[in-house]
Amino acid sequence: MAQVALIEVSEPDADPFRRDELARRLRRELWERGVAADFVSLLPPPGGPGEAMASGALAVPLCSGSAAAALAEGVCRWLAAGEGRAVRVRAGTGSVELTRGAGECRRSLLEWLLRHGCGAEPEGAG
């Protein structure tokens, strides 16, 4: 079974409808780069407010270094396109959070994805 990255989007004061819209925009950004992403619903954390499913999440298969590179590019471009945007990416047992202000977003996310995804080497490594 392929490793999957779970991407949660957020923005200050975003309600579930806004998070859904943000996820749709990120999905479109990823699709333009050839990255397949499916909408997923997440349960709120135990003890957290609300019984409804949380929105604003995508699942993306990580099966190669090129998929991870396209994912990193799409996520970082999406972050740069809006003030206050943030993402939390989970793969395996790890997670990383990024904001628009994160320096060297693409490289740091790509390296993280490759460590927690398929175990491929970054382009130019070696």
Image (cartoon, rainbow, N blue to C red):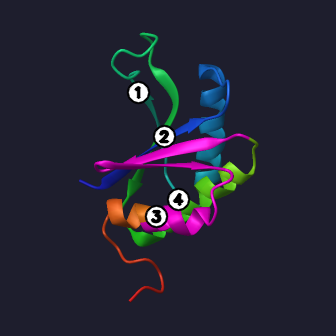
Q: Secondary structure at mark 4?
A: helix
Q: Position of residue 84 (x, y in %)?
A: 71, 40
Mark number displayed over residue 68: 3
**Contact flag, marks 2 and 1 (Cβ < 8 Å):** no
Is residue 9 in view from this perspective?
yes
Residue found 41% across the figure and 27% down from its top: 42
Q: Position of residue 16 (x, y in %)?
A: 59, 21
Q: What range is drawn magenta here?
A: 84-111
Q: Which residue is mark 1?
A: 42
**Contact flag, marks 1 and 4 (Cβ < 8 Å):** no
Q: Position of residue 61 (x, y in %)?
A: 39, 53
Q: Which residue is mark 2?
A: 58
Cα separation between marks 1 and 4: 21 Å
* Crowd around label 4: few <14 · some 14–19 · many ≥20 (10 Å): many
**Contact flag, marks 3 and 4 (Cβ < 8 Å):** yes
**Contact flag, marks 3 and 2 (Cβ < 8 Å):** no
